[in-house]
Image: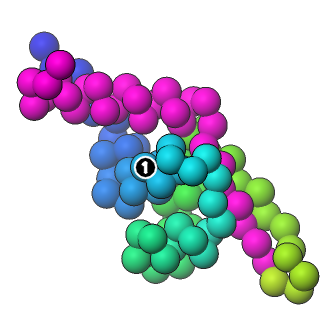
């Protein structure tokens, strides 16, 4: 029996965001946008979805006069990513 893949993480951009954060813990919006090649608007929408699910936290502040958005993966996000990877392994029959 296959586990259903988490639809929130099954989106290419949301999976890319979580994959980046799983490696570095936290990153600025601009860094994530550059690494994923996403538009700012689309990235904002996907970050909101991950934040609403509790997979990441978002902290908005100012760096000098420029706005700064910092995204950080949560324990729930790490657990969801690990489950997603394990469920995916089940589909491709890897132990």
In the image, the segment drawn in magenta is 67-95
Residue 73 versus residue 26 in the image, above or below: above
Majority SS type along the magenta span: helix
Image position, residue 85 (x, y; %): 31, 33
Residue occupying the point 22% across, 32% down? 88
Residue 53 versus residue 93 in the image, above or below: below
Image position, residue 34 (x, y; %): 49, 77
Residue occupying the point 26% across, 26% down? 87
**Farthest residue toward the left?**
93
Q: Taking 38 as reference, is 72 left or right?
A: right
Query: Which quadrant is home to the N terminus?
Result: top left
Neighbor class of circle 1 (other Cα within 10 Å; few <14, some 14-19, many 20+) is some
Q: Which residue is mark 1?
A: 19
Residue 89 in magenta?
yes
Query: Which quadrant is home to the C terminus?
Result: top left
Q: Is residue 93 visible?
A: yes
Q: Secondary structure at mark 1?
A: helix
Image position, residue 19 (x, y; %): 43, 49
Residue 6 versus residue 30 in the image, above or below: above
Q: Nearer the viewer, residue 93 or 60?
A: 93
Q: Nearer the viewer, residue 26 or 39?
A: 26
């Amino acid at each position: 029996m296959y586990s259903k893949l988490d639809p929130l993480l099954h989106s290419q951009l949301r999976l890319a965001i979580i994959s980046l954060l799983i490696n570095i813990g936290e990153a600025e919006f601009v860094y994530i946008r550059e690494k994923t090649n996403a538009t700012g608007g689309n990235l904002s929408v996907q970050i909101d979805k991950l934040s609403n699910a509790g997979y990441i936290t978002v902290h908005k502040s100012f760096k000098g006069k420029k706005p700064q958005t910092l995204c950080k993966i949560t324990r729930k996000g790490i657990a969801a990513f690990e489950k997603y990877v394990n469920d995916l392994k089940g589909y491709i029959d890897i132990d």
